Amino acid sequence: MSDAIRVGLVGFGYASKTFHAPLIGGTPGMALKAVASSDADKVHADWPGVKVMSAPGDLLDDPDIDLVVIATPNDTHFPLAKAALEAGKHVVVDKPFTVTLSQARELESLAKHCGRILSVFHNRRWDSDFLTVSALINEGQLGEVCYFKSHFDRFRPQVRQRWREQAGPGSGIWYDLAPHLLDRRGAVWPAGKHHGGPRAASARRAIHRLFSRRAGLSAAAGSTAWYVTRRRGERALYRSRLAGQLY
């Protein structure tokens, strides 16, 4: 398609492989032209005709790319988005947009200065249950909603050794799941009818271990809680929970 938006994808981890690349490839008017990744074989296994570049800078400098989609570790979103805007590209950044508010505001200002479109990708906004609730609210079938609560429960038998689970800027459950909850609050009510920003939000990482047949609870100071439930062999069960209450 000669008039298609030519897309370059930076990173080819879980988000790119599962969400971004399939959505780009399946959307009329868009064409995945290049991927910046250190693993060309992994990219070509799914997208054999796509050009692979080992360095993100090479993709940003490619004159054949109109739009850059950034799906890399969270702490790299800001420098990569900034470089893409300065290279004259339109930019979509996977959530979380940035790891600080000041970074987000700087990118917003830069996009306006460059005359480029800058957006953040929130895939959970299009879940059917969320769209249904939004429609009910917009149609007035629920009356005036003054309290909204949303949370995720994640069951994970083993904690994976990847950057999201390691200590560092932009890692952890808050940056992984909280953006979905906060985005839902901002999107669930029509523009101009918000009841204000969140007054309370919290993140808690709970690790459930099956030590013995005894039941009990001990909580560490801060955000980590340990639950002793029941025994199932020698297996340890890990469970993360993130909850937010927005008024």
Image (spheres, rainbow, N blue to C red):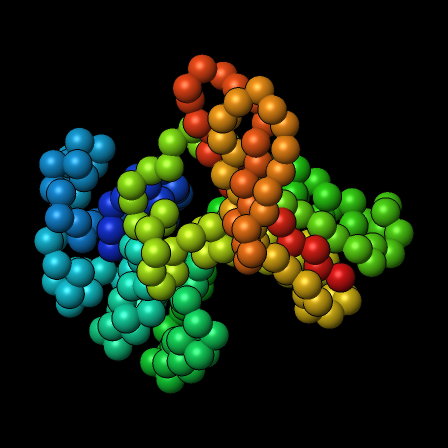
Residue beneath the point at 41% across and 66% down: 98
Q: Is residue 144 left or right of residue 57?
A: right
- Front position in the image: 185 or 86: 185
Tell me residue 243's x, y (percent).
62, 49
Q: Nearer the viewer, residue 224 or 241?
A: 224
Residue 204 seen from this side: yes
Residue 2: percent from left, percent from top: 25, 51
Residue at 24 percent of width and 51 percent of height? 11
Give how far across and how far down residue 90 sits, in percent: 34, 66
Is residue 50 found left or right of 123 in the rendered image?
Answer: left
**Above or below, comparing residue 169 to residue 166 in the picture:** below
Q: Residue at x 29, y 44 (%)?
A: 162
Give 226 or 240, whichever is nearer the viewer: 226
Q: Residue furthest bottom?
A: 113
- Residue found farthest to the right: 143
- Counting every numbered tag in the picture gives 0
Image-based side of 196 in relation to 110, left or right: right
Q: Where is 78 relative to 10, above or below?
A: below
Q: Give the camera-side residue of 191 and 11.
A: 11
Asked if residue 62 shows in the view, the reply is no
Q: Quadrant of residue 20?
A: top left
Asked which quadrant contains residue 203, the reply is bottom right
Q: Quadrant of residue 87?
A: bottom left
Q: Is residue 42 left or right of residue 147?
A: left
Q: Position of residue 166 (x, y in %)?
A: 33, 51
Report the residue at 25% width, 72% height from top.
Answer: 83
